[in-house]
Amino acid sequence: MVYRGQKLTSSWRIALLALLFAGCMVYLAMSLHRVQVVNSADLTRDQVRQSVRRVQVPGARGRIFDRNGICLADNRPSYCIAYYVEELRKRGKWQRTVDAVDADIDRLSKVIGLPREISKKRVALHVRTSLPMPLLAWRDVSEEVVARWAEEVGSFPGVDIYVQPERYYPYKTTAAHLLGYVGRDRPKPLPGQRIHFYLPEMIGKSGLEFEYNEMLTGVSGGRLIRVDARGYKNAVWEGTPAVEGDDLHLTLDIKLQLALEKALDGKKGAGVVVDPRNGEILALASAPNFDLNDFVPAPSHVTWNKLNADKALPLYNRAIQGCYAPGSTFKPVTAIAALTTGKITPDEVLHCDGVFKLGTMRLRCWNTYGHGDIVLQKAIEQSCNAFFCELGHRVGYEALRVVAADVGLGVKTGIDLPFESSGLLPTDEWKRKHMREPWRVGDTCQIAIGQSMLLTTPLQMAMLVSVLANKNSLYRPHMIARDGPGEIVREMNWPAPVIDLVRNGMHDVATKGTGRRVQIHGTEIAAKTGSAEYDSGGKRKKNTWVTAFAPFEKPTVAMAILVEDGLSGGYTVAPLIHDVMVEFFGETPVEEMDDSLNPPAVEDISD
């Protein structure tokens, strides 16, 4: 009985174990079914979410062309030496991998002959935050460096050449302030997507690169990277391709731009050339300038500090930001205000004895002996200060201000360039607020000859003379080529005799007056010279101007050029206008000019 009982007990235990084992197998099978079949989709999504990283890839930046299809801003391949850290990974702590990469960078530095560009701290930061991405140890290296690396490529596993696009400016310093430059920054996030990593994108920082950044940038694409549990990359899939940015086609004429910059070479100043028929900017320059390629991929500390320390302010766009008293180039505005208000007639004679007197104030004419009896057209030709001071006294400031505001002074022109200045068209309220003084008649007389508180930009003066050229319309200046007529900001509706008299006076300036050095053979030019004195450390200096348009009857070009610290508009700037006009009209300058074109003696120089 005992034997049989023991036998039955063992059988029961075996059966129980078998039943338990079978239950576990059933449970395991059900769990596997649940994981592999029922919850397969959810778990796959979780696995992808935890192991796949999205990388945002920018599109190629659009190019910039002049009006004739000449490329002014392009993209070029930039060769970088990159470390792929997953191929240099070390077991154990992260620091072991950091130390290995850092030591390898030192070793490679000796081979390629370049000093290190990144620190060990930067390597550690990359390992902690951007492990699946390439670590760019050297950027924008030369072909010689690439060749040295290629000779030793077998000794450096995990190192490869990484190619990224960089901006390239074929004309270097030409149109630098106008085109602007780019920098590297984070791209605009893709809508509705979580981005883990990104490749830096070129972002416009100044000029047209900044103004039209959205158009030039294009649309980013995406790339997928699979990483392991420690974050190392083990697979890459190409995702949505990036879309290239749009190209810009400008109104700029590069040949005219080169001529304008050549005229300004070695000077501090600015110039603007505009088509008076539609507001197209044909050339815009500020001197001195800088090499745009020094900002690619980024300016060195030496270059940046040198540019910022330069007292000539090469980064400053004088053409649209510089504010200067316009001097006698403002006198056509005074003439129009006087004629339209009936304060003078074309034949009325005023007398100039070399000085305008108003109470205790004395405003001297550049001709110390005076012009004698003189009428308005002759006063424009000779730029007689005494005559125009008297006109300002008669007209009053409000009439002057209205005409000046109509031709666009005191407000931004609205050109499609960033950081434009508005200049200053002062009022009694402005003077009381900023100078704590009331407006005086003497202020009006000084502004009538373009002095005192009145400030304008070279661009504003180019637009002013374009109104005189086309006789009626103030256009909004623009840089981007487009079909159809220009945008008219304001119509002047001046009486024909008024504008004709002023234009004839400017024609006389160019043929026999203060601006006769602008003349070119075969093309009639109208011009107005100007000089505005200012105090510099106790010394009196002059900013010198010329505004001009041509051909006289049917103008196709209008321009303004300013040179800081010149002798006079007629002596310093008029020859520059001449050179630019020669380039525009394809004329050969007269080799020998008659005595009437010789400059006046230095002591007689004014406008």
Image (tube, rainbow, N blue to C red):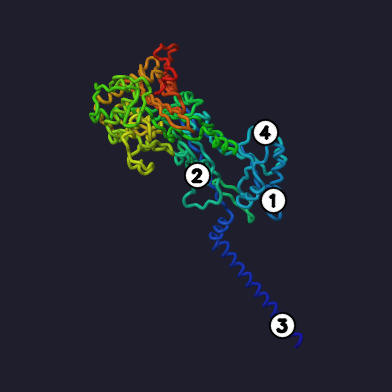
Q: Which one is earlier in the sequence, the residue at label 1 or at label 3? A: 3
Q: Quick check: 505 above or below 155? A: above
> Label 1's element?
helix
**10 Å crowding of disc 1: few (<14), some (14-19), many (20+):** many
- Alpha carbon distance from label 2 to label 3: 75 Å
Give percent across and percent down for residue 598: 42, 15
The answer to which image quadrant residue 452 occupies is top left
> Label 3's element?
helix
Is residue 236 in sight in this rendering?
A: yes
Of the residues shown, which amino acid type is indicated by label 4?
Ala
Give percent across and percent down for residue 538: 48, 32
Is residue 71 in sight in this rendering?
A: no
Q: Is residue 20 left or right of residue 584?
A: right
The residue labelled by disc 1 is 97
Q: Quick check: 105 above or below 490? A: below
| Contact (Cβ within 8 Å) of mark 2 with mark 1 | no
Q: Which one is earlier in the sequence, the residue at label 4 or at label 2? A: 4
The residue labelled by disc 3 is 9
Q: Which one is earlier in the sequence, the residue at label 2 or at label 3? A: 3
Q: Nearer the viewer, mark 2 or mark 1?
A: 1
Of the residues shown, which amino acid type is indicated by label 1?
Thr
Give percent across and percent down for residue 51: 59, 55
- At horizontal 32% and vertical 28% (from top left) the residue drawn is 357
Q: Which one is earlier in the sequence, the residue at label 1 or at label 4? A: 1
- Alpha carbon distance from label 4 to label 2: 32 Å
- Alpha carbon distance from label 2 to label 1: 32 Å
Q: Which mark is residue 147?
A: 4
The residue labelled by disc 2 is 220
